[in-house]
Image: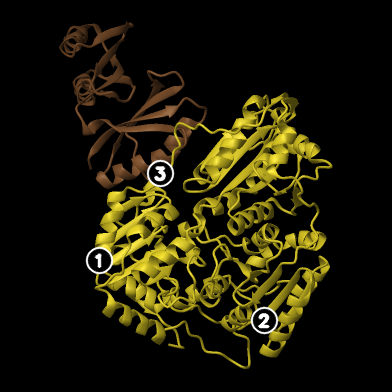
Chain colours: A yellow, B brown
Amino acid sequence: MATTNVITKSRAELIEKFSKPEVISGSEILLRSLLLEGVDCVFGYPGGAVLYIYDAMHGNTDFNHLLTRHEQGAIHAADGYARASGKVGVCIATSGPGATNLVTGIATAYMDSVPLVVITGNVMSTLIGTDAFQEADITGITMPITKHSYLVRNVEDLPRIIHEAFHIANTGRKGPVLIDIPKDVSAAKTLFEPVTDVNIRGYNPTVSPNKLQVDKMIKAIKEAKRPIILAGGGVVYSGAHEELLEFVTKTEIPITTTLLGLGGFPSGHDLWLGMPGMHGTYTANTSLQKADLLINIGARFDDRVTGKLSGFAPLAKIVHIDIDPAEIGKNVHADIPIVGDVKTVLEVANQVAERAELADEWRSEVMASKTAHPFKYIDSDDELKPQWVVEMIHETTNGDAIVTTDVGQHQMWAAQYYKFNKPRSWVTSGGLGTMGFGFPSAIGAQMANPDRLVVSINGDGGMQMCAQELAICAINNIPVKVVILNNQVLGMVRQWQELIHENRFSHIDLAGSPDFVKLAEAYGVKGFRASNKDEARQVWEDAMNHPGPAVVEFVVRRDENVYPMVAQGSTIDQMIMGDAE
Amino acid sequence: MMKHTIAVIVNDQPGVLQRVAGLFGRRGFNIESITVGASEEVGLSRMVIVTSGDDHTLEQITKQLYKLIDVIKVIDLSANPMVSRELALIKVQAEHTARPEILGVVDTFRASVIDISTHTLTVQVVGDTEKIDAMIELLKPYGIREISRTGVTALNRGNQK
């Protein structure tokens, strides 16, 4: 991958370089502080209120700046970067429309607990509140969707604020932090000394669990006849995949991983039941409903997982492990609440965890169900089935790719048919369900992992929401493989209109979409198309062998549905199984 | 629905009221009254919020408040003995003939008259919410022109901080 810059300086070298107190501008402080926080790549878009910041970046070779073609692309890329690396994603936008174009991306990151530091310019502080040109109250607008935000009033505060922002974003329950910098603050000069300590009185996340609560969980495991683990994004975010595997190995409890938890546990493991919820596996859903002990590890009992809440896991004693105390008891009452970082909690638990010895019968029942009820679809030799395409991609990439998705049917098929074995290999907008996320997030994921294969799976709808970022793939030779499962319709809406709204198909036809191959080529990206299996295998191989970015359009069956499906308002064991079952 | 009085100690920062009020609004928590002022410590403000909801709601309110970086401490005042006071200014229609009666009510409530005009009296009353409600009821027959209430401020009783 030939990107713009190569990062050469270590943090130690940078601290050395910047340690001498020096009078510099707010913009220069921002850049130095970003470097000191270990940032090697930022995504952004310049404008009037960030002119000083971009001026300071002129000729900078210490980190990469990717100029996206829309601020939304920048923030989704920063999000993908963060999810695929565990580092804080950073993006920069100007005031007013630049800032408001970030809103969807900030909300996306907030819902999925992704650490971002979002830097916006604002109008000069003397103009704030006057409806000045390109003024927007972005701290006010984003208050409900940020973990915290700062409006910088004095340049002297900037080093502390940036250091705090990175700390807040990437500790506790992670999330986006916004720093709004008025233009005069980015221009003003002050004495800069790197900030190394953090002292935020109102912020002290609980990391270590209460040992008594962990003991209660261990006792509950001993007594359980039908235990199950529900593991979520918290496992991935706290880097607890090894600890989780050890916990399951020791307790031998069957495990289901939520959409965001995919990759947090090896999918090849016997005890893995797949994903639960609206489009989850038969076995995960029925097992949750039959379980007498449910251990939630870093998941938040989202409504797409629980289905009808009052009927969810009706027989289970609930253990809930979460870094965010507010999640415990929010949707589902916890009999044994455990507040703490998932990795730390599991380390403590693994010291005393024992096999769930009363659960042998349950294990056999669950394993038999897993064998009897895999995801199924009716394949065809006449037309491409989207599920087949995902399976083909999985096989040809050995399950080792980083996969990003957009939102809709293709997202669910990717979750169902791509089998993940490693954490941080799956980038998808779960909570907010943001169309337009899939492709730009792949750019970020690739920037964070230059040596890994990144495949972005999209629908023909969502691809058109951020397609403009093909430009930066071409210019920087970012070798993302962009898959478009083109069914020429808004498939998930079509499915709901068919199944729930009695075939009243309303405004879902995507006729008039561009020729995606030509679109790719217009940007200077290699384009491919396939309409049957032979073509599909061939163009996919060609795309994989192509050293740069590629767009691969698979023309798939229009009216395919995602199954199983739990209709909204049903309990999760009331699944519509589809024709293949 | 149980009524709860909670104190929220917050950083005295711009926007902090918006953060707290916004949180209540977007999560569907009710605010019956809210007061904000300086606390015993420089740099910290004390909000007193009267809200209603069951124990689960109160627990969520507390936990969600703690997620705000500017929130230092949340105290469920009504879980322990507390003193709570509210101040109200009531401008009441007061023709000459009615004044002695109104002043009688003012005396009984240990309220005070803080402004007199040709046709009105403005009464200041301090007490718990029920006392102020009662006084308003008694003044209604004379014709209430305007009411301004501060909302409840409160502290726990006794030695505990």
Numbered circles on residues, count: 3
Residue sitting farthest toward the front: A351
Is B146 rendered above or below residue B107? Answer: below
Query: At 23% across and 43% down in the image, what residue appears?
Result: B1
For label 1, the residue is A222
- Nearest-to-viewer mark from 1 and 3: 1
Query: At 47% across and 36% down in the image, what residue appears?
Result: B69
Q: The C terminus of chain A lies in which quarter of the figure? A: bottom left
Q: Which mark is residue A555?
A: 2
Spatial CA span between label 2 and label 3: 49 Å
Element under label 2? strand
For label 3, the residue is A206
Please tell me which of labels 1 and 2 falls first in the chain: 1
Spatial CA span between label 1 and label 2: 51 Å
Position of residue B101 measured from the top left corner of the image (x, y, whole percent): 17, 10
Q: Which mark is residue A345?
A: none
- Whether callout 1 and callout 2 share a subunit is answered yes
Query: At 46% across and 21% down in the image, what residue appears?
Result: B43
Q: Give me the chain letter of mark 1.
A: A
What is the quadrant of residue A451 in the picture? bottom right
Is A211 rendered above or below residue A224? Answer: above
Local crowd at mark 1 within 10 Å, few (<14), some, or many (≥20)?
some
Local crowd at mark 3 within 10 Å, few (<14), some, or many (≥20)?
some
Spatial CA span between label 1 and label 3: 27 Å
Task: Please state which amino acid type lies under the numbered disc 1.
Answer: Lys
